[in-house]
Amino acid sequence: MKYPVDSIRRFGIAVSIKAGMTQQNAEIFIDGMIAADLRNIRSHGITKFRGYLSRVEHGVSDIQAEPSIVRTAPSTLAVDGCNGMGSTVAWKTMEACIQTARETGVAFAAVKNASHHGIGGYYVMHAAEQGMIAFEVCNSPKLVAPFGGAKPLLGTNPISIAIPAGQHPMLVCDMATSVVAKGKIALAIKEGRSIPDHWALDAEGRKTTDPVAANVGTLLPFGGPKGYALALIIDVLCHCLAGANDSQHIPRVFENLAEPSNIGYCMCVIDIGKFLPLHAFQQSVDELFDSIKRCPPAEDFRGVLIPGEIEFAAAQKNLAEGIELSEPVLKEFRELSEKYGVDFYIPQN
């Protein structure tokens, strides 16, 4: 069933404040999950709410921590997440990058001691809305086999990019370097569904459609050696440069409630206005997108889409119609309502 976005948002913010967040950080936290659900990335949406708070309740994430952001050169930022909430760390790092890029034209931040922050698209889209081009990568627990291997050694290590346009929606590339994100396996388990057999291997290195078997096995890199190369590069940036754990030493975020994550992020923001007027850039992007979309469609396709276009359309639709909440998520909401003393009433759309 679908439920109104405003009702979900109010409930989530109220619970987050009761759990120890400031109003601002609670809004960032909940809006990030809602952004995922609006774009139909349900694996990173409000289904993660209970899991994040479980880490707080077990003392392995500090809900009140603020990141330490040190400007080490005109365009570079070294960030210690101080084991805070991933949404707080990532949003405030991106804000610092935006402000730095306004001064110097470009900003690069390397972040350690962070935690799971939801979809990277939430943060890079925020920068694109300010007239910036933004990139973000992060590493994650070992879930993916290197190309040719049958044992997980790398994370899903996602990469997110947003580029503003004019008349067109912004380009948004937000993807794991595995065939799918781990959250899709977790969501399939929660909802009792099977998975395609090209997503993962079981513990014996065999293809599987069982998400439970996949959860104890290994995901596969997208594009074989190409996804593997990108995942390894991201681990180098987040571990060797930023100082976070490598994927082999990041604990499973929602299964291990005894150890801090020490995940790493790297963010880069480019101020378009330092190269040419923003409107001229946007016009050029629109013209390029128009030329791409004029491409004749292949068989069984209705036309060419710009990356992020499907998700943009979904977000507009879901804002009006509401967000899908499964019965397991509703059950978790009721438990949170009781635990934190927040009234639970979310009408169906």
Image (tube, grey):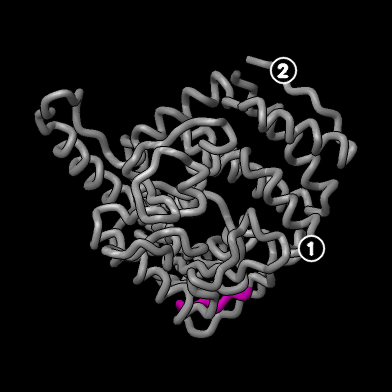
**Height in image: 104 above or below 120?**
below
Amino acid at circle 2: Pro
The residue singled out by tag 1 in the image is 59
Task: State the image quarter where residue 31 is shown.
Answer: top right
Question: Label 2 to label 1, Cα distance in Å?
Answer: 33 Å
Secondary structure of the residue carrying tag 2 is loop
Find the residue positioned furthest to the bottom.
Answer: 72
**Height in image: 128 above or below 295?**
below
Closest to the observer: 194 or 323? 194
Confirm whether the magenta stretch covers residue 78. Answer: yes
Residue at image location 79% in from the left, 31% down from the top = 334
Amino acid at circle 1: Gly
Dot placed on the residue nearer the N-terminal end, 2 or 1: 1
Residue 164 in view here: no
Confirm whether the magenta stretch covers residue 29. Answer: no
Task: Give the class, few, some or many, for how many residues have Cα within 10 Å of label 2's Cα (few <14, many ≥20).
Answer: few
Q: Position of residue 195 (x, y in %)?
A: 42, 36
Q: Position of residue 206 (x, y in %)?
A: 35, 50
- Say whether marks 2 and 1 touch (CB < 8 Å): no
Q: Position of residue 171 (x, y in %)?
A: 33, 45
Closest to the observer: 150 or 233? 150
The residue singled out by tag 2 in the image is 347
Q: Quadrant of the N terminus?
A: top right
Q: Is residue 273 left or right of residue 68?
A: left
Range covered by the magenta-colored residues: 75-80
Residue at image location 18% in from the left, 26% down from the top = 301
Camera-near label (2 vs 1) is 1
Q: Is residue 317 left or right of residue 306?
A: right
Q: Is residue 171 left or right of residue 323?
A: left
